[in-house]
Image (cartoon, rainbow, N blue to C red):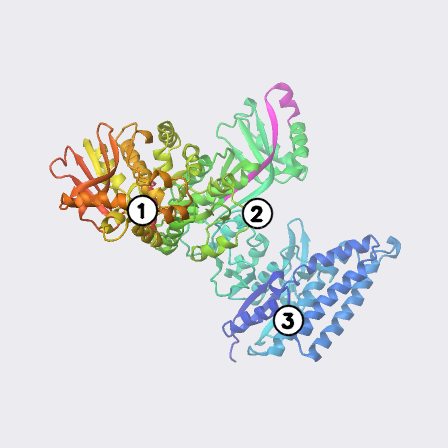
Amino acid sequence: MVQPDPWVVHKFGGSSVADADCFRKVAAILEAAPAGRLAVVLSACRGVTDALLRLVALAERHDERVAAEIAQLRERHVGIAEELLSATAAQRYRAAFDSDCRDLKEVLRSLQLPRSLEHPRGSGRDVSDLVSGYGEVWSTRLFQRFLAERARRPGPAAWLDARRVVVVEWGPLGPGVQWAESRANLDAQVPAQFDGTLVITGFIAVDRRGVPTTLGRNGSDFSASIFGALLGATEIVIWTDVDGVLSADPRRVPDATVIDSLSYNEAMELAYFGAKVIHPQTIAPAVKGRIPIWIRNTFAPEKAGTLICAEPASRLPVKGITSIERVALVNLEGTGMIGVPGTAHRLFGALREEGISVILISQGSSEHSICCAIPQEQAERAAAVVRRAFERELAEGQIQSVDVDADQAILAVVGDGMAGTPGIAAKVFTALGDSGVNVRAIAQGASERNISVVVEGRGAMRALRAVHAGLYLSPHTLSIGVIGPGTVGCVLLDQLAAQSERLRQQFRLDLRVRGIMGSRRMLLADTNIPMQDWRLQYRQSTRAADMERFVEHVRLDYLPHTVLVDCTASPAIAAHYADWLAAGIHIVTPNKKANSGDYAYYQRLQSARRSGASHYLYEATVGAGLPIVQTLRDLVQTGDEISAIEGIFSGTLAYLFNIYDGRRGFAEIVREARARGFTEPDPRDDLSGQDVARKLIILGREMGLPLELNAVKIENLVPAELAGHSIEEFMARLPSHDATMARRLSAAQARGKVLRYIGRLSAAGEATVGLAELDARHPFANIALTDNVVRFATRRYRDNPLIVQGPGAGPEVTAGGVFADLLRLAAYLGARL
């Protein structure tokens, strides 16, 4: 006789069978499964169990809405059936449903009878279990008919009412499966040679009296595990609406990631401490039979999911971080406890006698105190019980105090791989300390599978996020906020979009742009703005710009580093730098205003940077992408002596005087440069020389000179009478001043010279900005159109000055300079690039 294929159990929760489309998805998943026998356990359609329990409550109150609620349930299920089934099959389903509704109404009427006339079905508990189990009957009947009509899997599709198989006995630990009786029932219901698909009701069973009962919350998962054991399944697949078991609750930890595999023990530890993984009771039959359990997503079946098994292959030492909140800490303290046996026995015995559940225990080796965590709603009762148990010791002073601290939370870090792995506990406590979270109590078993700490409840989310970041995220994760998505800012964002994934893969450098703010709106994201379409998302954002809210969002205490990138030229933004630096926020910017403004503010910036242990990078303020500031800093810090710095610091003015040869008017060249984007929107910002002067101030202060902007001698190329006009009027009237510039050029040419706009700075602090006549062979006379060129004359480079030259204008090179500063910051913070 040919042996049939082994069984595989699939369980689908309520969200997986919420509507007709969901039923189709479930069918498609099963039809794509490998050939073999399938047992399919279904929950009730989403929300139906709650609706049925609500019916019981309404009936007990004699509420007239019972009939209307039943009608709604009928309309929903019949509607799904009519969408999925043929007319004949839908009619049969409707007839069976109507019969159930008549029975349901009769059962609910029994709750309204006087005790002496109580319905023979039994107690209120029995009625509640009977009523709440209808949802699984309805969903499985419908799905079995649907699967049979599709006929896309080999073999028949049969319906199995679990109440004809599973026998349980409720006890203090919940429903206990009566395996011998259940196995005998299964053999009677399902022929050994059955070779098809069984559609089985989840959640419901019977007790030894034959009275319908349920398996409690998460009961359908338990049903799947029970049938997995009864059928000798090779695996159990729990289909839900998440991609697998996550490292933390994604609603509280946006960076939560799917865990590839867990041991049974890890899954049970996480479940005990509140993780929505799978109920520990559900795992028990699978553990005994060593049946692997998969957690997968109905709505993303292509995802691998999470495997729960005896020997997982995952390399992750920590598999999850979870928490229990609304906890109280009971602390018993006294010198009379030291060396006295039985104290713990008396404490926990008193709590046990009152039915108070102890979640966690912590005791120091000195035996001076012992504490435990309990559910907060039991706190007052626990305090009274413990004080009563130690009444004599408290009166005699052997026990100094019995304290109960409410509003606490337990944070649990779980993973088999922590055993024998040094440094895990250090990461946990470092993360908590860095986030300002105080630890009240600690517990760790000898297995090292679990590290649990008690923290204040109000800091639970902060603690959860901090520890998760410390254990799962790259230590080189930067939370980035970009201010000013304009000419330079938008190019920088595009560069980040193009390179971020490569940097993450090659160097574990995680650059997370979590906020973009312009003058009117801002875009915020919990984890990372999807960079490939940041423009669309930014345009669609309706959130008004709010600097305080923006900084608060970008700065997260659970992410290792916060960086604000200011791509504006705004003095108002620069005025915030000192406060940000003092708060430990790193700054990267091409904005010259802060470093070239009031010298007292410049000093405050340096002091704030030191006190906040933050970094302030501004290479792009002087030479766009050229390493001018870094070169000067290297010279100074290695002991060289700067005697003079001179150069062409404006790509705009370099272009104008490279092009201007007298054959065309100067105003025409300015107009052309503006049209090509080589000037500021208002060309006077370039022609005034202020921009070059600010760059000299920045370099002078790097040399240690206390320069102020008003000390720079500036030759302003904007005619005085045109300074107050609009941009359009300025451009229209500029040609009338061409003759002045033409005479200047002719005089220089007559002497064999060329005109260049030069900035000069001496070691004595003399700073000048203006037009200079240079020999045609001078290095500054022979540069590319928009080049910047800077010459450093120093003690080391006295006879042959050091020259830095290259493009000094344009959004691409400026954004590149800002990006390079961002990578330099990452290197300072420990990234290996």
What separation in Å lies between label 3 and label 1 (alpha carbons)? Answer: 61 Å
Judge whether 67 appears above or below 149 on screen.
above
> How far apart, in angstroms, are the residues tagged by discs 2 and 3?
32 Å
Compare residues 566 and 192 and report the one nearer the observer. 566
Coordinates of residue 618 in the picture (x, y in percent) = 33, 40
Read off the residue under disc 2: 274
Residue type beneath disc 2: Gly
SS at mark 1 in the image: helix
What percent of the width, then of the height, locates residue 536? Answer: 48, 57
Residue at mark 1 to residue at mark 2: CA–CA distance: 48 Å
Of 542 and 110, the residue lying toward us = 542
Q: Residue furthest left?
A: 799
Decide which of 343, 751 is in the foreground and name it.
Answer: 751
Q: Is 540 within the magenta?
A: no
Residue position for label 3: 143
Check whether the beta carbons of the residues at disc 1 and disc 2 lie within 8 A of each other.
no
Span colored in magenta? 390-412
Q: Position of residue 245 (x, y in %)?
A: 51, 55
Q: Do we see residue 7 in this rendering?
A: yes
Estimate how packed mark 1 is, as few (under 14), some (14 to 19) or many (20 or more) residues with alpha carbons within 10 Å. Answer: many
N-terminal label among 1 and 2:
2
Please say if 678 is above or below 195: above
Q: Earlier in the sequence, mark 2 or mark 3?
A: 3
| Residue to which mark 1 is pinned | 817
